[in-house]
Amino acid sequence: MSTPIKITTPGVYLQATTSPGDRVALPDRGAGAQILVYNDSAALAFVAFGDGAVTASGGTLAPDIPVPPGALLTLTRPPVATHVSAVTNASIADLYFAAGEGN
């Protein structure tokens, strides 16, 4: 049975650009293993989870997780992830992340 995600923390914002170094810290692990991602832009974005040095990759060779324009995704945060990085192939993307439990 599917349980709607229950958000347990304030969200974080990341403006992704074509620079692969755009990243932000995620809420504490105690906030939940699920991350709700919303792309409030017209640009396709790619996200990657990791430590403070994580760098997302776009393009077609070995892209990270694609987040289409206007999409709302629920992703499971890797156990060691403290940060999220995002990049676009062109333009900018306004991304919002919130942590919680559910699916």
Image (cartoon, rainbow, N blue to C red):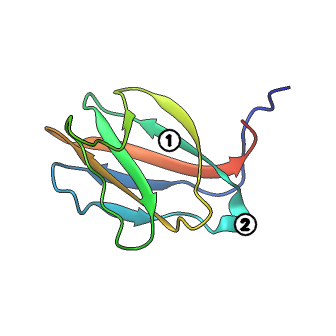
Point out the tag, 2 or 1, that comes first from the N-terminus.
2
| Mark 1 burial class by Cα count in 10 Å: few <14, some 14-19, many 20+ | many
> Residue 58: where, in percent of width, then height?
24, 43
* Residue at 57%, 68% in the rendered image: 80
Residue 37: image tag: 1
Residue 47 vs residue 60, the one in the foreground: 60
Expressed as whole percent of the image width and height from the top left, the position of residue 19 reads 16, 56
Check disc 2: other Cα within 10 Å, few if <14, some if 14-19, many if 20+. few
Amino acid type assigned to the residue bearing label 1 in the image: Val
In the picture, measured across the screen, residue 77 lies left or right of residue 43, that is right
Q: Is residue 15 above or below residue 92?
A: below
Q: Are marks 2 and 1 in contact (CB under 8 Å)?
A: no
Depicted 7 relative to depicted 5: above or below: below
**84 up-or-down from 44: above or below:** below
Q: In the image, 72: left or right of 67? A: right
Provide the residue designation for mark 2: 30
Secondary structure under the numbered disc 2 in the rendered image = helix
